[in-house]
Amino acid sequence: MILKAWDKSMNFAEEKPLKSLIKIRPRKSAKIIRIAGGKNARLILGQLGIGVGSEVKVLRNAPFAGPILLENSGTSVAIGRGIAAKIIVEEI
């Protein structure tokens, strides 16, 4: 998926490839661009310190529908694949 990112002057900047968090490989970092889930998903992620603009590092992407282990501000957090699929990120 490719979405256009806005720059500060509200003009379209370059096109940046965005993808779901479950597509990020271990030991790679990403910036959260959007959370496509509902209010409860955003609330739960907010309680974990994860929100739009946060930078996270994928520590482990467990196979066979296992959880994804993230590092956010020095803290390790595990989230399920269902909610991770709703987190749209830009790899950095």
Image: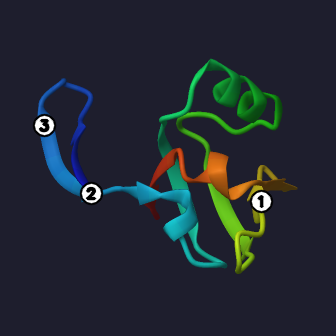
Residue 18 is situated, as x and y percent measured from the top left of the image, at 35, 56
Rate crowding at label 2 as few (under 14), some (14 to 19) or many (20 or more) other CA atoms within 10 Å.
few
Please report the residue visible at 46 percent of the width from the left and 64 percent of the height from the top.
92
Left or right: 14, with 33 as reference point: left
Left or right: 74, with 82 as reference point: right
Please report the residue visible at 54 percent of the width from the left and 46 percent of the height from the top.
87
Whole-number angstrom distance, CA of label 3 to CA of label 2: 17 Å
User: What amino acid is at disc 1?
Assistant: Glu
Circle 2 residue: 1
Disc with the residue nearer the chain's start (1 vs 2):
2
Please report the residue visible at 71 percent of the width from the left and 78 percent of the height from the top.
64
Q: Nearer the viewer, residue 48 or 86?
A: 86
**Mark closer to the observer (3, 2):** 2
Residue 14 is situated, as x and y percent measured from the top left of the image, at 15, 51
Which quarter shows the N terminus?
Answer: bottom left
Outermost residue toward the front? 64
Q: Which mark is residue 46?
A: none
Place residue 47 in its image quadrant: top right
Residue 21 is situated, as x and y percent measured from the top left of the image, at 55, 58
User: What amino acid is at disc 2?
Assistant: Met
Q: Which mark is residue 12?
A: 3
User: What amino acid is at disc 3?
Assistant: Phe
Whole-number angstrom distance, CA of label 1 to CA of label 2: 24 Å
